[in-house]
Image: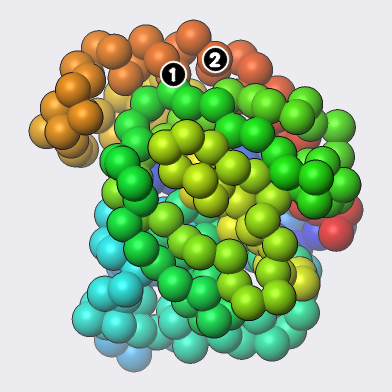
Amino acid sequence: MRRVLIIQNDPPETLGLYEQYLREKTDLTIIYAYNLKPGQTFPPVEQFTHFIIGPTPINANNALNHEFLRKEWIYLQAIINSRKPCLGVCCGGQMLALLLGGEVVRSPSKEIGGYTVKLTEEGQSDPLYNGFPSEFPVFHWHNDMFTVPPDGELLATGDPCPIQSYRKGHVWGVIFHLEITSNDAIRWADAYPEEPKVIGKTREQVLAECRETEEEMGRLAEKLMRNFLKQ
């Protein structure tokens, strides 16, 4: 039995279908990092076999300005040092990239709604994407992007954001979301109602884009988790 830890970093931004799959297939623990009390710490890394780091609207470059993320920053370094499989989603992937020597920079354009990403040659041979098509639909809601850490590999690209996924050793980062259902998208749209307007989209358009590919993203979300647990 895999023992998986999810670190949730923002109340609206759950890990949706990933969490649902892991509840059924693993011994799952979720830590709501934003609720950590001053004296509360993360559990020992040794208790878990796999780690998933969730998103937050906080800019990863400002993580150390927030008490709970300062604690998490130290814990993420311990995860990296453990050499156990770790997946960072959106800002989770950005924080891991920074710890691995990469950068977090502004994306060429804000991405909100439905997009398509394409696996690189390295991505097509990476075990995390085993069985994936070379191009697939994703959901986005972000301003910033990570760079590929030194000695890491670019696994997926997109437009307008050219860096969609990386790997360095046992750490993977993805800027996109496969785990989002239309109900999750509604919750995000309620939490950040003004943001779609920045790129000329309406709330209804963003939700429609999610519904259009929800079924395929759901299948890929399960496949991604299955592949991750094999690592």
Whether label 1 touches label 2, CB < 8 Å: yes
Q: Quadrant of residue 173?
A: bottom right
For residue 213, which numbered disc appears in the image? 2
Q: CA distance from mark 1 to mark 2?
A: 6 Å
Residue nearer the viewer, 60 or 187: 60
Amino acid found under the numbered disc labelled 1 = Cys
Q: SS of the residue at dot 1?
A: helix
* Relative to 188, 184 lies left or right: right
Does residue 110 lie above or below 151 as drawn?
A: above
Does residue 97 lie above or below 166 as drawn?
A: below
Residue 5 visible here: no
Q: Quadrant of residue 14?
A: top left
Q: Quadrant of residue 132?
A: top right
Q: Quadrant of the N terminus?
A: bottom right
The residue located at (59%, 33%) in the rendering is: 117
The residue located at (44%, 23%) in the rendering is: 114
Residue nearer the viewer, 149 or 76: 149
Does residue 180 lie above or below 174 as drawn?
A: above
The residue tagged 1 is 210
* Relative to 46, 157 lies left or right: left
* Relative to 185, 97 lies left or right: right
Q: SS of the residue at dot 2?
A: helix
